[in-house]
């Protein structure tokens, strides 16, 4: 029998996502500039729920997603269900700050941070408190982010490849890099690869 959380997530996200149509709220931002498939965005302060996973990259996706999905589907003190917001962010855990979000990526063994951006309807005072102490709530400050958008598979090799492209572009265009890269996924794994929206994010000055 399937895990109830898996069933809930499937029912919540399925809809038309196989065909690449998204209905969930997206983290807000202002577009500052654009060059091909690379954008410079300004993100306002946002609330996030995040969790630290000690596992391989391949396994961390499932573990982290189920843990955070459990929180938004009622695993909180108020037993309140909340809407999913995209993207889902994942990065290597920081060497110095174990639960940074969703920013600095300095590989520390097999530790990964997965982050859900919470709906803009909530504040720190109104956002439900997680029952799982492995789910951390925090407010992220405003930040300027360089973004490279691509479709296809979402795996370590592809993320590393796209990260190098973005970092080279930043160097060529004299942007100061403030973080390592992190992945941003807008679709569930069953979405057809060529219809997926994937991104690599790097904070810049």
Image (cartoon, rainbow, N blue to C red):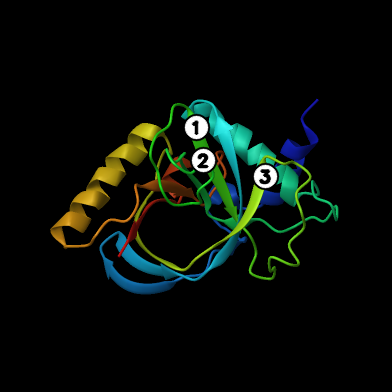
Q: Nearer the viewer, mark 2 or mark 3?
A: 2
Residue contact at pointers 1 and 3, CB within 8 angstroms:
no
In the rendered view, does 52 fall on the left or right side of 104?
right
* Residue in view at x 48 percent, y 51 percent: 102
Could one spot residue 14 in this view of the protein?
Answer: no
The picture places residue 116, in percent across and down from the top left corner, at: 59, 52
Report the Cα–Cα distance between label 1 and label 2: 9 Å
Q: Nearer the viewer, residue 157 or 132?
A: 132
Report the Cα–Cα distance between label 1 and label 3: 15 Å
Disc 1 on helix, strand or loop?
strand
Could one spot residue 32 in this view of the protein?
Answer: yes
The picture places residue 122, in percent across and down from the top left corner, at: 70, 68
| N-terminal-most mark, 1 or 2 | 2
Residue 3, quarter of picture: top right
Q: Which residue is mark 3?
A: 135
Residue 41, quarter of picture: bottom left
* Residue in view at x 85 percent, y 56 percent: 78
Q: Which residue is mark 1?
A: 111
Could you say which disc has been placed on residue 42 in the image? none
Q: Quadrant of the N terminus?
A: top right
The picture places residue 16, in percent across and down from the top left corner, at: 61, 53
The picture places residue 161, in percent across and down from the top left corner, at: 28, 39
Q: Which residue is mark 2?
A: 98
Residue contact at pointers 1 and 2, CB within 8 angstroms:
yes
| N-terminal-most mark, 2 or 3 | 2
Q: Nearer the viewer, residue 40 or 144?
A: 144
Q: Nearer the viewer, mark 1 or mark 2?
A: 2
In the rendered view, does 37 fall on the left or right side of 155?
left
Report the Cα–Cα distance between label 2 and label 3: 13 Å
């Amino acid at each position: 029998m399937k895990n109830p959380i898996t069933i809930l997530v499937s029912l919540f996200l399925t809809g038309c996502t196989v065909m690449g149509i998204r209905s969930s709220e997206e983290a807000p931002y202002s577009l500052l500039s654009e060059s091909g498939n690379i954008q410079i965005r300004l993100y306002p302060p946002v609330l996030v729920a995040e969790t630290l996973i000690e596992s391989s990259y391949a396994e961390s996706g499932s573990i982290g997603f189920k843990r955070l999905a459990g929180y938004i589907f009622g695993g909180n003190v108020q037993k309140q269900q909340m809407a999913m917001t995209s993207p889902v962010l994942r990065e290597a855990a920081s060497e110095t700050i174990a639960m940074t979000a969703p920013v600095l990526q300095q590989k520390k063994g097999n530790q990964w941070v997965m982050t859900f951006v919470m709906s803009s309807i909530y504040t720190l005072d109104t956002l439900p408190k997680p029952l799982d102490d492995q789910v951390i709530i925090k407010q992220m400050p405003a930040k300027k982010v360089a973004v490279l958008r691509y479709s296809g598979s979402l795996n370590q090799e592809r993320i590393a490849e796209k990260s190098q492209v973005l970092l080279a572009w930043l160097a060529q265009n004299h942007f100061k890099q403030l973080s390592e890269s992190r992945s941003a996924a807008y679709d569930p794994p069953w979405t057809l690869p060529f219809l997926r929206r994937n991104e690599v994010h790097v904070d810049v000055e």
